[in-house]
Image (cartoon, grey):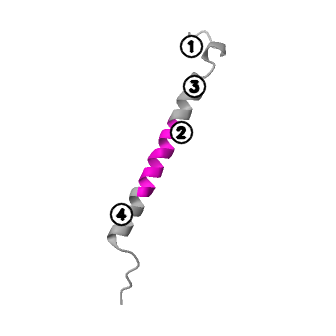
Amino acid sequence: MMVKCCSVVELSQGMIKRQFWFQAFILIILGMGVFFRLDNLEQKVYWHDEV
């Protein structure tokens, strides 16, 4: 006896929502990484091999 819990449409809609939030999370993390890398760049101390 097989119990059907969810339809294929419900599962695919849930996966699409989850994929959207995952992509949004990745974009936010990448944006924050770029921002913090370039923030106050003129005040940062560099070693001689970085210049």
Amino acid carrying mark 3 in the image: Arg
Residue 31 rendering spot, x and y as whole percentages = 52, 33
State the image quarter where residue 11 is shown. bottom left
* Foreground tag (2 vs 1): 2
Q: Which mark is residue 12?
A: 4
Amino acid carrying mark 4 in the image: Ser
Q: Is residue 7 magenta?
A: no
As measured in the structure, the alpha-carbon distance from the residue carrying label 3 to the one carrying label 2 is: 12 Å
- What segment carries the magenta color? 17-30
In this rendering, does residue 45 appear at all?
Answer: no
As measured in the structure, the alpha-carbon distance from the residue carrying label 2 to the one carrying label 1 is: 25 Å
Q: Which residue is mark 2?
A: 29
Element carrying mark 4: helix
Residue 42 rendering spot, x and y as whole percentages = 62, 13
Mark 1 or mark 2, which is nearer the start of the sequence? 2
Mark 4 or mark 2, which is nearer the start of the sequence? 4
Q: Which residue is mark 1?
A: 50
Residue lying at 56% horizontally and 28% vertically, measured from the top left: 35
Rate crowding at label 1 as few (under 14), some (14 to 19) or many (20 or more) other CA atoms within 10 Å. few
Residue 27 rendering spot, x and y as whole percentages = 48, 39
Q: Quadrant of the C terminus?
A: top right
Answer with left or right where residue 5 lies relative to residue 8. Answer: right
In this rendering, does residue 41 appear at all?
Answer: yes
Examine the rendered structure and indicate whether residue 46 appears above or below residue 35.
above
As measured in the structure, the alpha-carbon distance from the residue carrying label 3 to the one carrying label 1 is: 14 Å
Examine the rendered structure and indicate whether residue 48 appears above or below residue 12.
above
Mark 1 or mark 3, which is nearer the start of the sequence? 3
Q: Which residue is mark 3?
A: 37
Examine the rendered structure and indicate whether residue 39 appears above or below residue 43.
below
Residue 10 rendering spot, x and y as whole percentages = 38, 68
Mark 2 or mark 3, which is nearer the start of the sequence? 2
